[in-house]
Image: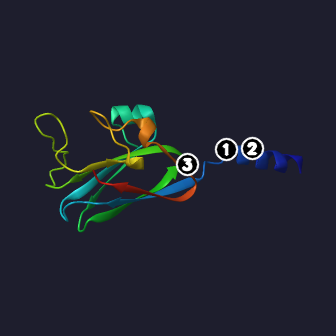
Amino acid sequence: MMMTALILAASLGTAPAEAASLIVHVEGLPEARGAVMMAVFASSESWDDGDPVAGSRVAVRSDAVTVSFDALPAGAYAIRMYHDVDGDGELDVNLMGIPSEPFAFSNNARGRFGPASWADAVFQLVPGENTHTLNVQ
């Protein structure tokens, strides 16, 4: 009996964190062509390094799309996305380096002379289903 209780207690201590799903609604896309390119980051370091934990490419057929991510551990996350209007797989920029294709960050954060900061874009993912809405800039 004592051994069973110890095994049960040990297994409870090593149980994996509950998984979360993330459904992202992107609104305000200016053209019904190309693709939404989205990356999800799990730390300020990965945000700064451009090393996402998940990513997705979704074809654009209207002024809105929905992107889903499954089996993410609960915790802090931030999202970067852009509307690849011409479908070349790259964020187009002008001669000054300013994006010429629409983009957005989680929390609808805005950057000043660059991308939004992790602190402005971070949100908490809890176990179960989570939704987030991005409005394209």
Q: Which of marks 3 and 2 is nearer the N terminus?
A: 2
Identify which amino acid the numbered label 2 is placed on.
Ala
Q: Do the residues labelled 1 and 2 touch (CB within 8 Å)?
A: yes
Identify which amino acid the numbered label 3 is placed on.
Ala
Give me the C-alpha separation between circle 1 and circle 2.
Answer: 7 Å
Q: Which residue is drawn at 46% across and 44% down?
A: 77
Q: Residue at x 49, y 54 (%)?
A: 71
**Which colour scheme appears in the figure?**
rainbow
- Image quarter for residue 98? top left
Mark 1 element type: loop
Which mark is drawn over residue 14? Answer: 1
Identify which amino acid the numbered label 1 is placed on.
Thr
- Image quarter for residue 97? top left
* Residue 101 percent location from the top left of the image: 19, 49
**122 to 29, vertically: above or below:** above
Q: In this view, does 45 lie to the left or right of 73?
A: left
Q: Earlier in the sequence, mark 1 or mark 3?
A: 1
On the image, numbered disc 2 is attached to which residue? 10
* Residue 39 percent location from the top left of the image: 35, 47
Crowding at label 3, few (<14), some or many (≥20) Cα neighbours within 10 Å? some
On the image, numbered disc 3 is attached to which residue? 74
Crowding at label 2, few (<14), some or many (≥20) Cα neighbours within 10 Å? few
Mark 3 element type: loop
**112 to 56, vertically: above or below:** above
Give me the C-alpha separation between circle 3 and circle 2.
Answer: 22 Å
Mark 2 element type: helix
* Residue 42 percent location from the top left of the image: 45, 41
Q: In this view, does 20 lie to the left or right of 44?
A: right
Q: Which residue is drawn at 32% across and 38% down?
A: 111
Give me the C-alpha separation between circle 1 and circle 3.
Answer: 16 Å
**60 to 97, vertically: above or below:** below
